[in-house]
Amino acid sequence: MRYIEFKITADKEVLEAAEAVLLEHGYDSMQIDDPSDVRDILDHKDLYKYDYINESLSEDLERKPAITLYFTDDEEGRRQQADAEALLAGMKGVDHEASLTGDDSEWLYKWQEHFRPTKVGERIVVKPGWEDYDPAQGELVIEMDPGMAFGSGLHETTSMCVKALERYMPEDAKVLDVGTGTGILAMAAVLLGAEGALGIDIDEEAVRVATENIRKNDLEGSIAVMKGDLMEGVDYRPDVIVANLMADLVMMLSPAAAAQLETGGIYITSGILDIKEETVSEAIGAAGFDIIEIMRDGEWRCIVAVKRQ
């Protein structure tokens, strides 16, 4: 089968916003080409200690940064591509084009080459189904096979949320995962000792993928997944809310999260770019939370807060 190469180009700041939108809707299998990263490596070879950089990456350092997604060339893949285009439709300065490319067996093989069992926190390990893994004492394994549009959940924002759950989730907590995507955070919470979890996502495909991943990990009895817009109409009283979304959605969600949590409830949010850290922190504080930690990984932030008295 052939596959669709969907390439998105924009200036760096706009492309970062596009990346955040795509991540929020479950598109976390993407290739990112940012010439500023290459330029930084070339300017600081002693710091990065790279022996080799592909010449094609350093030939045109004035090119716009780009994100590339891959979809199967069938009805489902074309629908996923159309959904991605719709998400980007209202963003100024974003260009995109789609083209058919060769047999996807080589792409899938290369993807498998790079997706190995990965530790995303102190205890949680994510592994693909085609890999054997013997967990060390105390490690908890989530098995996940990424498709073309829905990836492994190993983005920096997801990893920070897992670490926050490990550090701050009370024993036997009920967890609400807003924007569940692949379901990885709900599954991590239950494996770490949560009494149960509810995952919510606005995207029907994300609900399907999360449900399948939960079944694959034998966690159906502890996790439910539903389609919904943030927390609208949700009748669930959690001890912890985790929301790996994007800055604007985190700010929109915060008052509802404060209303849903009891005093002392934990609110974990990510998908926040460094340039939005202060704005989002102020919105979370104004909603009724005290921030107890801001985790940083590259350009991304994860804010952990507690519902105040």
Image (cartoon, helix red, strand yellow):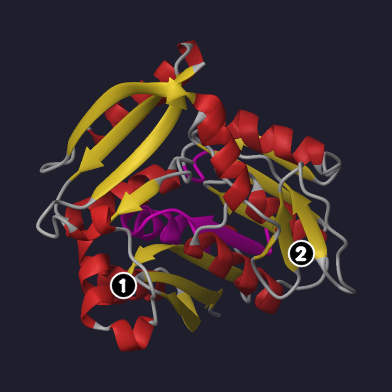
Q: How many marks?
A: 2
Tell which of 306 and 77 is nearer to you.
77
Label 1, residues with CA under 10 Å away: few <14, some 14-19, many ≥20:
some
Judged left or right of residue 308, residue 254 is left
Judged left or right of residue 168, residue 58 is left
Residue 104 image point, x, y percent = 51, 26
Which residue, as the protein is rendered here, is positioned at the far top? 75
**For marks 2 and 1 on the same chain, the one whose residue lies earlier in the sequence:** 2
Q: Can the viewer see residue 175 in this picture?
A: yes
Task: Answer with the quarter of the image where residue 97 lies.
Answer: top left
What is the C-alpha distance between the residues marked 2 and 1? 30 Å
> What amino acid is found at the position of numbered circle 2 in the picture?
Ala
Task: Answer with the quarter of the image where residue 3 lies.
Answer: top left
Query: Disc 2 on helix, strand or loop?
Result: loop
State the mark number for residue 163: none
Label 2, residues with CA under 10 Å away: few <14, some 14-19, many ≥20:
some
Q: Is residue 191 above or below residue 64?
A: below
Judged left or right of residue 98, residue 69 is right
Judged left or right of residue 292, residue 284 is left
Question: What segment carries the magenta color?
Answer: 230-259
List the residue tagged with mark 1. 274
> What amino acid is found at the position of numbered circle 1 in the picture?
Asp
List the residue tagged with mark 2. 173
**Residue lying at 80% horizontally and 38% vertically, measured from the top left:** 216
Residue 119 image point, x, y percent = 68, 67
> Within the magenta stretch, is there residue 171?
no
Tell which of 235 and 47 is nearer to you.
47
Which residue, as the protein is rendered here, is positioned at the far bottom? 46
Residue 254 image point, x, y percent = 43, 61
Q: Can the viewer see residue 235 in this picture?
A: no
